[in-house]
Image (cartoon, grey):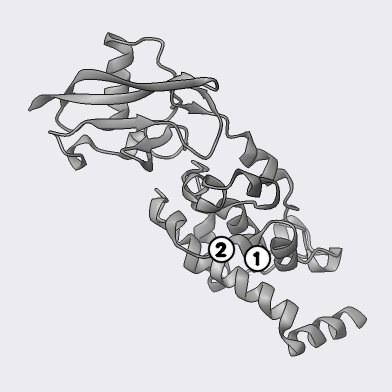
């Protein structure tokens, strides 16, 4: 079964652009990216779009479908109203390069600001041992494919460009939480307080846990409840709880 659909695709570059309408054939079982490829093949070969695996694992084809951040390769046409136009626009939070392609270098810059895993002293890499329940706490976060949809939907930077220098966004606050929960991370011994850094250096306080990042994650990572809220609790404990503060001083003195 096939039908004709109207696609309104944003065409332009950093200087500006507009929505361009196209009539295109849609076949049963197709996803939005299939239709975009058909547009390139039949009507607009110069349409710029990123894609790679077409299997929901590379995170390349992020865009906004009818105003919602999605992976085009994971958005089935059968989930969209067939009698309404499908509007494709680039991710709004990042600068447009051309058409549906955006400059996501902001995210790589934020990734470089986060100190990496600090190996435990005196333990060789092959000798790391962890309980499965400790592994499970942060293993979920390793599923991230860096599509940056959570970054795109986060209103802290989506609606406030001025926050970008001081706010890492949910993807990288989740990375800090992952490291802070790692049972073998020896960052504290190296003078790195991850939860304090999340608050002071990466803007954790800007997050008001609206859960929009969790809602758009194609890997269904529970970013808000499992990463951001626990990280906020740790940051608050270490800053305001007198017993936690005292314990940190005792350990440091030893």
- Asked if residue 138 lies left or right of residue 10, the reply is right
- Relative vertical location of residue 29 with respect to residue 16 in this rendering, above or below: below
Report crowding for label 2: few under 14, some 14 to 19, many 20 or more residues within 10 A (C-alpha). Answer: many
For residue 3, what is the image quadrant? Answer: top left
Q: Which disc, if any, is residue 62?
A: none
Report crowding for label 1: few under 14, some 14 to 19, many 20 or more residues within 10 A (C-alpha). Answer: some
Q: Which disc, if any, is residue 138?
A: 2
Along the line of sight, the residue nearer the viewer: 206 or 108: 206
Residue lying at 17% horizontally and 34% vertically, measured from the top left: 84
Secondary structure under the numbered disc 2 in the rendered image: helix
Evaluate whether residue 177 shows in this view.
Answer: no
Q: How many marks?
A: 2
Evaluate whether residue 156 shows in this view.
Answer: yes
N-terminal of the pair, mark 2 or mark 1, is: 2
- Asked if residue 116 lies left or right of residue 48, the reply is right
Tag 2–tag 1 contact (CB < 8 Å)? yes
- Asked if residue 170 lies left or right of residue 56, the reply is right
For residue 100, what is the image quadrant? Answer: top left
Along the line of sight, the residue nearer the viewer: 98 or 148: 98
Q: Position of residue 26 (x, y in %)?
A: 17, 25
Q: Quadrant of the N terminus?
A: top left
Secondary structure under the numbered disc 1 in the rendered image: loop
Residue under numbered circle 1:
182
- Asked if residue 28 lies left or right of residue 125, the reply is left
Residue lying furthest bottom:
243
Residue lying at 72% horizontally and 52% vertically, measured from the top left: 114
Q: Position of residue 202 (x, y in %)?
A: 69, 56
Q: CA distance from mark 2 to mark 1?
A: 7 Å
For residue 52, what is the image quadrant? Answer: top left
- Relative vertical location of residue 240 with respect to residue 175 in this rendering, above or below: below
- Relative vertical location of residue 55 with respect to residue 160 in this rendering, above or below: above
């Amino acid at each position: 079964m096939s039908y004709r659909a109207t696609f309104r695709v944003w065409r332009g570059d950093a200087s500006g652009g507009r929505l361009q309408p196209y009539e295109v054939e849609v076949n049963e079982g197709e996803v939005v990216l299939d239709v975009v490829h058909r547009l390139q093949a039949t009507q607009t070969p110069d349409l710029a779009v990123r894609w790679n695996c077409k299997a929901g694992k590379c995170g390349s084809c992020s865009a906004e479908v009818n105003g919602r951040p999605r992976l085009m390769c994971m958005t089935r046409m059968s989930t969209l109203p067939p009698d309404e136009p499908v509007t494709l626009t680039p991710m709004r939070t990042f600068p447009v390069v051309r058409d549906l392609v955006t400059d996501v270098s902001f995210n790589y810059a934020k990734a470089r600001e986060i100190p990496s895993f600090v190996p435990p002293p005196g333990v060789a890499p092959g000798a790391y041992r962890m309980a499965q329940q400790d592994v499970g706490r942060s293993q979920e976060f390793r599923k991230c494919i860096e599509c940056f949809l959570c970054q795109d939907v986060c209103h802290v930077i989506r609606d406030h460009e001025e926050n970008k220098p001081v706010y890492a966004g949910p993807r990288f606050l989740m990375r800090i939480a992952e490291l802070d929960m790692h049972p073998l991370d020896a960052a504290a011994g190296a003078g790195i307080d991850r939860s304090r850094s999340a608050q002071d250096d990466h803007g954790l306080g800007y997050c008001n846990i609206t859960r929009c990042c969790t809602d758009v994650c194609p890997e269904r990572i529970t970013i808000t409840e499992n990463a951001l809220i626990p990280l906020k609790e740790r940051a608050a404990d270490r800053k305001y709880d007198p017993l936690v503060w005292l314990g940190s001083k005792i350990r440091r003195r030893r």
